[in-house]
Every structure is written in structure tokens, then in C-alpha cells.
Image (cartoon, rainbow, N blue to C red):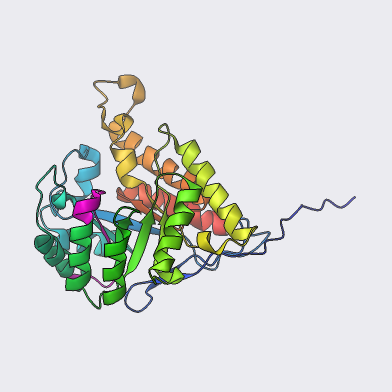
Amino acid sequence: MVLEIPKVDYTGNIREVSLGKKGAITVGGGTCYPFHLFEGAMPNKPCIAMEICDCPPEGWPDAAIEPFKDVTDDPVSWAKKCIDTYQAKLICLHLSSTDPNGLNRSADEAAETVKKVAGAIDVPLIAWGTSNQEKDSEVLRKVAEVCQGERLVLGPVEEGNYKKISASALAYNHQLVACSPIDINLAKQLNILLSNMGVGEKDIIIDPTVSSIGYGIEYCYSVMERMRMAALVQQDSKLQMPIICNIGRETWKAKESKITADEAPELGDAAKRGIMLEAMSAVVLLIAGGDIIIMRHPEAIKLVDDIIKDLLN
């Protein structure tokens, strides 16, 4: 008796999106559920973006800062170290200094920083705000203007500020990260709103909002899984964009990543604990359908990259 493995007949596909000035990286394009290569193809492997900040980070555990302790005061040097030392193919610059509850730096200052980083590296760049909708609207619009021609990815864009940011992205030829709060219907609605503004579907990346293991990742997984089902089986064109998961910041702000071995000896080495939490959370989101994973620690990134290679082979 011959065993026949049941296969799903997919009628849709994930849209390919090229990032960077010359399409330096292409993500998406899958014609099957993540890593179901016996049913379809994943022509472009998932991409890991290395996270940097535009100012010395606050609240990062020592283990997360250690690989970058000599460059955290200079985002250009930080980005170059990620590329030269850790072979990063994509950089995500968090504009932490613009947070109104923190340094509250101006949009002009942020834009100049992004321009310097973009000009110093030869990989695609994501400029990520603080999720304060009013401030992000001001900052990302200025970044779009000052960095015309750099073909940045700007985010997060939310329902409360999409009109102004999308208008600037269109005017200066940038791409957008459409962020919605863990809800498939809200994600689809925001994509429709952006499309109505004239943003091309190949210039939109979905951010469904994610969390780490132990903090509701099951719900995030379920929402991402439903997005992929709608895109691949139901041919829902408004959910066929690649998905980005900003998981690094979520895992390293978790209590389990910050608490020391002296405070909780039963949890073991704090550095290894944080690295494993980030790596495992990233793999869960990859299996759920993540195309771009924003991560922080080089060792966690290497673990995840090795797993991606194994799954694709």
C-alpha cells in the first residue's frame, strides 16, 4: 500500500516585494503555507533585519547591549558593524530618540540621522517610529522628504496617521509597514485604506503586531495563520502582502530576559535565556508566516538563520 501525503491545492500566492533602491532584497512570493515545500514553493527565503537605535538604548539587558557596546552612541557605526561583522542583509533603525516621553528629538534631527545611515550602508533600511501616532506622522513624513531616492521602508503606519504618511511615501517613493493591533479584519481594512490612497500593493508590508513566547504569541500565531489562509486559499488580494514581525524588542523587554541569575537562579544563565527566548519566538513567527523578522542579538539571529536553511533544505 502506497502512502499518499494529502496536499492542499492553493489558488493564491504571497506577493513579492522588493526592498531597497535596486531591489536588493525580495521577500514574499510563496505559493504554499510556510515551509510546506511538498505543496508549493518559497522562492525567497525569509529575511532577518538587525535592529539598531538612533541613540544609546535604555532598558536593554546587558546581554543585548554587549555585542554593540562600542557603537551604541553612533547609529552609522552600529549599522556598519551589523553588516560588516554580522553580515546583516537588512537594517531596522528605531527612532527611539523621537519618543515624546523620552528625548523627544525633532523630526529634522531624526531625518538627518536616517539620511546618514542610509547613505553609509548598501543594504535596505527600515525607519521605525515610536508608535506615537502624532509624532510618527511628523517624523516619518520628514524622513520621507529628506531621504528622497533612498527607497526606505517606513513604519509603523496606523489607521490614525496613514493619510499623511502615505502621501509622503507616494511623493518621495518609499514603502510602508501597515500596522494593526492583532486583528485580521483591521489589517485588511488598513491595506484597503492605503490602496485607496494610491499606495501600490507591492509597497505595503503587513505588521500584525507580535509578542514573545509567554506573552500571547499563540494569539499572534493564530491571526497570522488566518492571514495566510485568506491569502493562499481564499485569494484575498488585500492580505497577500509579506508580513513583518518586530520580535526583538518584544523578547528583550520581557521579564524573563531581564531578570538576573542571582535574582532567579532557577532560570539559569540570563544571557543564554534571552538569546533562546528571542530565537524561539522568531521561529514560531516564521512558521506562522513571517517574511521579515526584526531581531536584536547576533547569536539568536544565527540560530534562526540556521533553522531557516534547514527548513528550506
- Of all residues, the one furthest to the right in this rendering is 1
Q: Image height check: is 276 above or below 140?
A: above
Does any portion of residue 295 appear in the rendered image?
yes
Q: Image height check: is 245 above or below 273?
A: below
Does any portion of residue 87 appear in the rendered image?
no
Q: Position of residue 298 (x, y in %)?
A: 31, 51
Left or right placement of residue 153 versus residue 97 in this view: right
Q: Position of residue 73 (x, y in %)?
A: 10, 53
Q: Residue at x 18, y 50 (%)?
A: 96
Q: Position of residue 279 (x, y in %)?
A: 40, 44
Q: For the image shown, how many numbered marks are present on the structure?
A: 0
Is 132 one of the magenta-colored residues? yes
Quarter holding residue 193: bottom left
Magenta span of residues: 120-136
Left or right placement of residue 122 versus residue 42 in this view: left
278 and 149: which one is in front?
149
173 and 51: which one is in front?
173
Q: Quadrant of the C terminus?
A: bottom right
Q: Residue at x 32, y 57 (%)?
A: 157
Q: Residue at x 68, y 59 (%)?
A: 38
Q: Position of residue 190 (x, y in %)?
A: 42, 57
Is 295 one of the magenta-colored residues? no
186 and 129: which one is in front?
186
Q: Image height check: is 170 above or below 9?
A: below
Quarter holding residue 141: bottom left
